Image (cartoon, grey):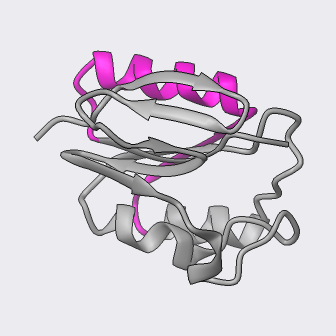
Amino acid sequence: MSSPEIASLSWGHMKVKGCSASYKDCKVWPGGSRAWDWRETGTDHYPGVQPADLDEILRKGVQTLVIGRGMSEAFQVPPSTLEYVKEQGVDVRVFQTEQAVKEYNALVGRGAKVGGVFHSTC
């Protein structure tokens, strides 16, 4: 199963290829995507991405995880979260969201088992 390409990104709006829904923030993995609702895990800009935000994607067998920190990089990624991903044997890459989407789509184009979480505002 391949990871879906991010078809478009603009402030507060993301589209995933093959999905009719649009997202503000999203999670993607081989074979699927869904809205990333921070309220599920109590996530906020600070301290940022929590391991609980990533478990669903890590369980999909990804080899690489790309994290988009927002258009202005206001969304934090604590070192403990990065360590957690690495402990699962997954390569993790963190970028400003536009760059994160480019990196993610490049990996998709190479057929990598990649997942991601993307924040499309601040």
Up/down of 69 relative to 95, above or below: below
Corner quadrant of residue 105: top left
**Residue drawn 54% across the image and 79% down it:** 52
In percent of width and height, residue 26 lies at 51, 50
In percent of width and height, residue 97 lies at 69, 33
Stretch of the chain drawn in magenta: 88-113
Up/down of 93 relative to 96, above or below: below
Up/down of 104 relative to 26, above or below: above
> What quarter of the picture does the N terminus occupy?
top left
Residue 16 forms part of the magenta stretch: no
In this view of the protein, which residue sits in the foreground, 101 or 88? 101
Up/down of 92 relative to 12, above or below: below
> What quarter of the picture does the C terminus occupy?
top right
In percent of width and height, residue 103 lies at 53, 23
**Residue drawn 27% across the image and 40% down it:** 113
**Residue drawn 84% across the image and 63% down it:** 45
Corner quadrant of residue 80: bottom right
Residue that sits furthest to the left in the current view: 1
Q: Is residue 5 left or right of residue 96?
A: left
In percent of width and height, residue 32 lies at 25, 49
**Residue drawn 50% across the image and 21% down it:** 8
Q: Is residue 116 left or right of residue 107?
A: right
Q: Is residue 27 left or right of residue 33?
A: right
Count numbered badges in the picture. 0
In this view of the protein, which residue sits in the foreground, 120 or 49? 120
